[in-house]
Image: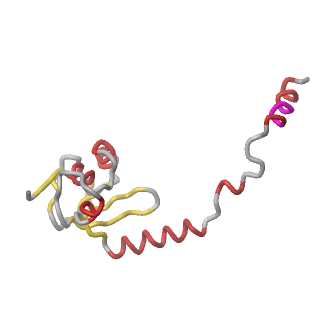
Amino acid sequence: MDELRIDKWLWAARFFKTRSLAQEAIEAGRVQVGGVAVKPSRAVRLGERITLRGGETARSIIVMGLSGHRGPAPVAQALYQETDESIRDRVAAQARRALAPEPALSIDGGRPTKRERRVLDRWRDGG
């Protein structure tokens, strides 16, 4: 096997849970091969550089193997190699997220209790 559809390869390499999710990401322009946006039917070859954008960081990977079958995670991880700068960026983003405050902590009271809700309802109804 010399080449494989990129949507099928992304699914087999476990970057997306389903092939249709991979197709949607490709069509949205979040997947690039060699810096160029591609179509889901584009053939991927060994040694090509793929950039996946999702969230705040982009992952840059190099295709090391081709497989049209979705196997266990260790087999899927052997299909690609993440570049050093991509790993560095991903670790830095993870560190930034760890230092960011938890949004839920800014909520003081949370949901009203049953008693508080009844008081609010009486207040809204005018009684």
Q: Residue at x 17, y 50 (%)?
A: 5
Quadrant placement of the C terminus: top right
Place residue 101 in its image quadrant. bottom right
Place residue 80 in its image quadrant. bottom left
Tell me where residue 40 appears, x and y as whole percent.
Answer: 23, 47
Q: Indicate whether 107 appears above or below 95.
A: above
**Extreme-left residue of the structure:** 1
Q: Indicate whether 80 appears above or below 11.
A: below
Per the rendered image, the range of residues in magenta is 116-120
Residue 115 in the figure: left or right of residue 44: right
Q: Nearer the viewer, residue 31 or 117?
A: 117
Indicate yes or no whether the magenta region holds residue 119.
yes
Tell me where residue 21 appears, x and y as whole percent.
Answer: 33, 45
Instruction: Give the dominant element type of the magenta stretch: helix, strand or loop.
Output: helix
Q: Residue at x 34, y 48 (%)?
A: 17
Q: Residue at x 26, y 60 (%)?
A: 76
Quadrant placement of the N terminus: bottom left
Q: Indicate whether 56 appears above or below 92.
A: above
Q: Indicate whether 21 appears above or below 79.
A: above
Tell me where residue 122 appears, x and y as whole percent.
Answer: 87, 27
Indicate yes or no whether the magenta region holds residue 104.
no
Count of numbered circles in the view: 0
Tell me where residue 113 appears, x and y as whole percent.
Answer: 79, 39
Residue 77 in the figure: left or right of residue 99: left
Place residue 85 in its image quadrant. bottom left
Residue 66 in the figure: left or right of residue 97: left
Q: How is the image coloured?
A: secondary structure
Q: Residue at x 61, y 65 (%)?
A: 100
